[in-house]
Amino acid sequence: MSAFDDAIALEPQPDGTWLGHTSPAYGNMVGPFGGITAAQALNAVLQHPQRLGEPISLTINFCSALADGPFTVVTRAVRTNRSTQHWFVELQQQGETNTTATVVTALRRDVWANDEHAMPGVPAPDTIEPLGPQGRVAWLDRYEMRVIDGHLPQPWDGREHPDSVTRLWVRDTPPRPLDHASLTALSDVFFPRRWRRHATPTPAGTVSMTVYYHADSVRLAATADGLLLGQAQAQAFRGGFFDQTAQLWNRHGDLLATTHQVVYYKA
Amino acid sequence: MSAFDDAIALEPQPDGTWLGHTSPAYGNMVGPFGGITAAQALNAVLQHPQRLGEPISLTINFCSALADGPFTVVTRAVRTNRSTQHWFVELQQQGETNTTATVVTALRRDVWANDEHAMPGVPAPDTIEPLGPQGRVAWLDRYEMRVIDGHLPQPWDGREHPDSVTRLWVRDTPPRPLDHASLTALSDVFFPRRWRRHATPTPAGTVSMTVYYHADSVRLAATADGLLLGQAQAQAFRGGFFDQTAQLWNRHGDLLATTHQVVYYKA
């Protein structure tokens, strides 16, 4: 079992909840990597015996850092329609809610399709060296990252950049066939856009993240364990919160997910 | 009291819930205009005596159409931190949940700010005729709309457009000072992007919408009842669901809100 599968594993409990554990392999500066928490929340819906269809959207709210150790996932199918289903999910520790999420699942239909946001022309992954072991926070070493442009500032000299764009080729380490859970975690691999605008490592943390899934499990399976092109950019920074909008394409140019988040920044 | 204030009015109940009513003035084809439902959900948090700070983000999930008449809003402060607060909100009718929402409120701080997504150069509002009475669905007549480009296709001849962009100047009718509730409703004024890509009025409806608020109440008050520039575009259409990403600026060029939604489309 890969580190990712191990991290998102959930054990069904007699009361209908799920038991999970934070994973040291996906540790971040404070608590776990938000992407793995999002994948855990989604996985409770994916594993649920009453689930209808596949994920269409997820919004996760990081209320408070998870402590290292076990947590309980509480799922509730709020509403089940003919072809869509609405879920509310909570991650709890010691009876307190640390994370909330809403998830929509649905049956997809074979209708007119188009990727209006086309994949930008970028250098092929094999022309870009992957980052070596980072040795900073554990989760970074769970991803193969080939940064095209907009990498972490080197050095942290406070210099201003005109934009916050980052583009990179990315996949799980070790490579693992893509599914909705891993695509969810991959939606959160971009470091805070605030750092990119000025080369200053001010504290920052995601408050809420939304993922829209544009691919069913068949399309994800066809992507297999290939690299994805990820692109992220902020739209506004004000009052200590900025937003980020991002896209993830596979190498065929299919837009697999679009994702947004609002992020706290200290200064 | 304006039609908008009347529509979002909530009456506190002895059990801590709120009583609201759908508003015929904001009727849509099936049930109410989603923007007014989102404003009602937010208003229950805005009115709450335990609220900390001002809105940072809202995600609303439209589980099922509200029936005309009264509804109950149930709010729960899931987690209150030093400077952020997480809410879960449900709109219920006959004990069934029709709508869920999560809201983050927070204390903003005066730190470095920047609108990375700058307002595009567009013609001034007074050079564009406002749409006349629409007489189609009630809510359209609650907004002054001066469409710059990407209006509803005329005629519905099935012709394909290369993109789904719409840009318009917009505000409440009658004009009303902007606040977080009305900004929330304004985030949903864009007709389905699917209609723009082919001039075909296939059924479509928002499944989930997220709003990120980039302005505090002081900045919104300074915008007063002026027109906002709204811009919307889809990123991907596939399997019967597409996404939309949109921005709302005031005439000073302040990016007040960025907003995203995933929308069902039939064909």
Image (tube, coloured by chain):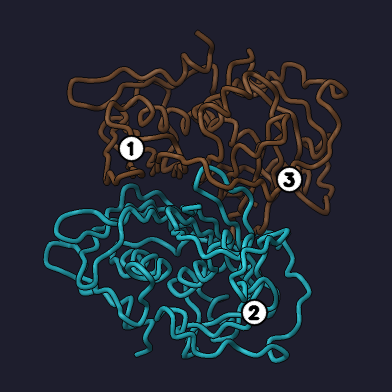
Chain colours: A brown, B cyan
Measuring from the top left, give residue A75's x and y in whole percent.
Answer: 29, 35
Measuring from the top left, give residue B124's x and y in whole percent.
Answer: 73, 85
Q: Quadrant of the N terminus of chain B?
A: bottom left
Identify residue for label 1.
A90
Q: Are marks 2 and 1 in contact (CB under 8 Å)?
A: no
Label 3 sits on a secondary structure element that is: loop
Q: Amino acid at mark 3?
A: Ala
Q: Which mark is residue B147?
A: 2
Residue at left offset 64%, top offset 18%:
A225
Q: Which is more foreground, mark 1 or mark 3?
A: 3
Quarter-wise, where is residue B24 in the image? bottom left
Q: Residue furthest top?
A: A1
Identify residue for label 3.
A118
Q: Nearer the viewer, residue B29 or B51?
A: B29
Q: Is residue B96 in view?
A: yes
Measuring from the top left, give residue B83's x and y in whole percent.
Answer: 45, 54
Q: Amino acid at mark 2?
A: Val
Residue at left offset 80%, top offset 38%:
A153
Numbered disc 3: what chain?
Answer: A
Q: Nearer the viewer, residue B208 or B155?
A: B155
Label 1 sits on a secondary structure element that is: strand
Q: Residue furthest left?
A: B14
How far is the residue under mark 1 from the one under mark 3?
35 Å
Do badges 3 and 2 share one subunit?
Answer: no
Numbered disc 2: what chain?
Answer: B
Do badges 2 and 1 share one subunit?
Answer: no
